[in-house]
Image (tube, coloured by chain):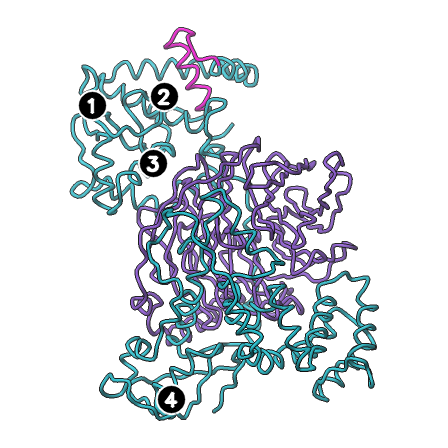
Amino acid sequence: MACQGLQSGETLASLKKESDSLKKKLEEERGKLNDIELHQVAEKVEMLGALSIKTKRLLKGHGNKVLCMDWCKDKRRLVSSSQDGKVIVWDAFTLNKEHGVTLPCTWVMACAYAPSGCAVACGGLDNKCSVFPLSLDKNENLSAKKKAVAMHTNYVSGCTFTNSDMQLLTSSGDGTCALWDVESGQLLQSFHGHTADVLSLDLAPSETGNTFVSGGSDKKANVWDMRSGQNIQSFESHESDINCVKYYPSGDAFASASDDSTCRFYDLRADREVAVYQKDSVIFGASTVDFSLSGRLLFAGYNDYTINVWDVLKGTRVSVLFGHENRVSRVRVSPDGTALCSASWDNTLRIWA
Amino acid sequence: MTINTLAKGAWHREQMASFRKKVIVAMQDPDMGVKMRNQRLLITVIPHAMTGRDIIDWLIQKYNICEEEALHVGAMLVRYGYVYPLKEPRSLVLRPDESPYRFQVSQPPLHPPGSVFILPAPIYLAKKNIRKQGELMEYEKERYSVLHKRINHTWDFVVMQAREQLRASKQRRKADRIVLECQEQAYWLINRPPPGAHNVLDMGLERINNSSRVTLVSDITFLYFLFYSLLFIPFVKYSEQYLNHDPIMQGCLPSNPWISDDTAHWTMNAEVVPSPTRLRVERWSFSFMELLNDSMGRREFMTYLEKEFSAENLCFWQACEDVRHGENSRIIEKVEDIYKNFLAPGAARWVNIDSKTMDKTLHGIRHPHRFVMDDAQMHIYFLMKKDSYPRYLKSDLYKNMLAKAVVPQETKKSVFPFMRRQRHARGRASRYQLCSWFPSLMPGPKTCQSQSPESPLYLLVTIATTQGVAFSLQSYCLCESQSFSFTAARLPELGFQR
């Protein structure tokens, strides 16, 4: 539901009041059903032993902050983008840089690998999201084959291909998300509802493949129906900007990372937050989250250069990963769950296993 | 250059972040905070300071963390300027020894009371220049001359201010002077970092936080209020089911390529292999989606359907997926193909859809769009899921596949993240364990003897073993120790009967 004009008799203040009272009512109804917290149920679940995760690869090559990365379906390649406009495709296993593109803009905050492995999408401060086919010919100039697909009115903060190479979903600082047809660049659907920059999005791993979640500077996480463009669910419990959202592997829940230094877990069927991952000694904002393959572990990257590993069910912290020398901008578990990749403002990427 | 250039937007927000202030306030608590006492700096005694070691110990004790983490948190506090060093003020690090530190004050302490507070940065540099008689660091000299050129018209004022401040500081006690100098130095190291140094003020892109617009909460047409605790079982179950498939938690066979540098694991699990691994074949039984997502599983399922003469269902589903996710330009042609092959009367591979859905689809085909096949696709999908899929899992085809599936040998006795060896443990949430999760729901003794389909125990077992959540209201009422209300409007698959 988009922003409507004021009707006669309504003022901004009265609308806000009504909106607040509606939200309060919703919370009351939800609160009545808060029976046992997730972790109490999980008390019956076995404790995790000590985790031993170490850096196994260090990817050096970017000359500036690495802002985003995405794995290829082949479980070893990945694409990363940085502040100086460079986008690099790596074979992370051999540390080989396979492709490099320089975009004419800075702050490439979003990049994604196509499901086929034959293309990458990236975008940022140019307000666009472009798709590059990956050619086997090393001499070919990839920039020449660039195709601008998404056009927003502000920076592009996140992008992902849907189940094929033909459709692209983007989120933007202009407060909207949009679905695009790659071939023609046509806008298929736009999603309005956030009242500030949208910072992240994730596609639901569901059978029907019709929904996605987005998080923004308005502290809200919204779930959308891709067909109709409707905002079907909304969650507002963070105290500051939501930097990242990621679905639980089953698709029934999602996690979020926020500047308020907490990560939270939301159950979609119960329509509420069910766990908060926080610790008094963690005092810097969380910028990124991802689940391990079984959904038992939550990896979260923070602005204090660390990655905290949380036990999703018990709500406790299992481990801290030190190593980066600046903010961690993105963490992603590989498609087969064998490794975790982290991108950082210290110009490097690390593979942990 | 105004005062506000220093404390604007994101940086100010970061500094004022309440959860960080909490830590600083706790540290400064006179009773429970870090011990403050006279610290010796060469021959001067600095009152009311703390040592690096004190800070670390306090963090360890207060937040129950290990030394490594305390060192990290402490280092961040210094880097971000909450605490500054009195020894070697140019180096913003936390030394876990007798080095003295102090808390930063919230404003740059530059001006004597009564003076006009403008141009703090150039004044600072001018002061330094005078004090060190021109012996500034290279980058400071550059900045000094740049500033001089830029605000040449007020330069006299700047120098005058600098002289004033230096004169005032000479009148202070040595200890105070040292403290103020260190305070200033730390402040400027953070707010005007030397070139090449880490800039903690770098907050990334500015976010246009427009809170003046109001959007009403959108139509909440689906409100899922279900008995809350039951919904947690799926997460616990899911994680347990996939535990053996999670390499970070349980390791993988023969070894994790990233750890051993051996790609055998990937070779064995490639898309097309003559003989798939046991874990992979097991996974096909977790859900229909798992089977379809694996190209090999899909092929096997197709073979099975061909035996059952219902292969057209899977072909139809695949063709619909192609429409949904394909190029815009080819939608019309693809939909026509689907009609010809699957829906037209007498079609070669006619699919069996109920008449209502068929009518709706045929009507929609006249003006084809991306989602025109959705209803029909969903119908066939659930048909396969409810009927063909469970039978496939019981079939000889699948059982044989499972029997001859490969279990790779562990390459070497490397240390796996968890030293557990229960690789083939099945889902352990038996009826008895479920029972113990819900003691409050069992009316009467907590045994699990009841076999009656009406009993709550049976009900719970049903819920845990099926994929969706469903229950009959009548049975639930038998459980008197809990009352609840719900207005469930829609449940994933199984119906909800009143």
Marks 4 & 1, CB-CB < 8 Å contact: no
Chain B takes which shade in the image?
cyan
Residue placed under numbered mark 4 in the picture: B476
The reply to the same-chain question for discs 3 and 4 is yes
- Say few, some or many: other residues with alpha carbon within 10 Å of mark 4 (under 14 / 14 to 19 / 20 or more): some
CA gap, disc 1 and disc 3: 21 Å
Q: Residue at x 74, y 62 (%)?
A: B326
The image's mark for residue B77 is: 3
Which chain is disc 3 placed on? B
Chain-order first, disc 1 or disc 3: 1
Q: Picture coordinates of residue A58 (x, y %)? A: 49, 36
Work out whether A67 lies above or below A275: above
- Occupied quadrant, residue B151: top right
> At label 3, which amino acid type do we have?
Leu
Point out the residue furthest to the top here. Answer: B133
The reply to whether residue A252 is visible in this rendering is yes
- Occupied quadrant, residue B472: bottom left
The image's mark for residue B343 is: none
Q: Residue at x 37, y 32 (%)?
A: B79
Would you say A344 lies left or right of B250 here? right
Chain-order first, disc 1 or disc 2: 1
> At label 2, which amino acid type do we have?
Arg
Residue placed under numbered mark 1 in the picture: B46
B65 or A294: nearer the viewer: A294
Work out whether B6 lies above or below A200: above
Q: Residue at x 39, y 60 (%)?
A: A312
CA gap, disc 2 and disc 3: 15 Å
The reply to the same-chain question for discs 1 and 3 is yes
The image's mark for residue B90 is: 2
Chain A takes which shade in the image?
purple
Question: Which stretch is magenta?
Answer: B120-138
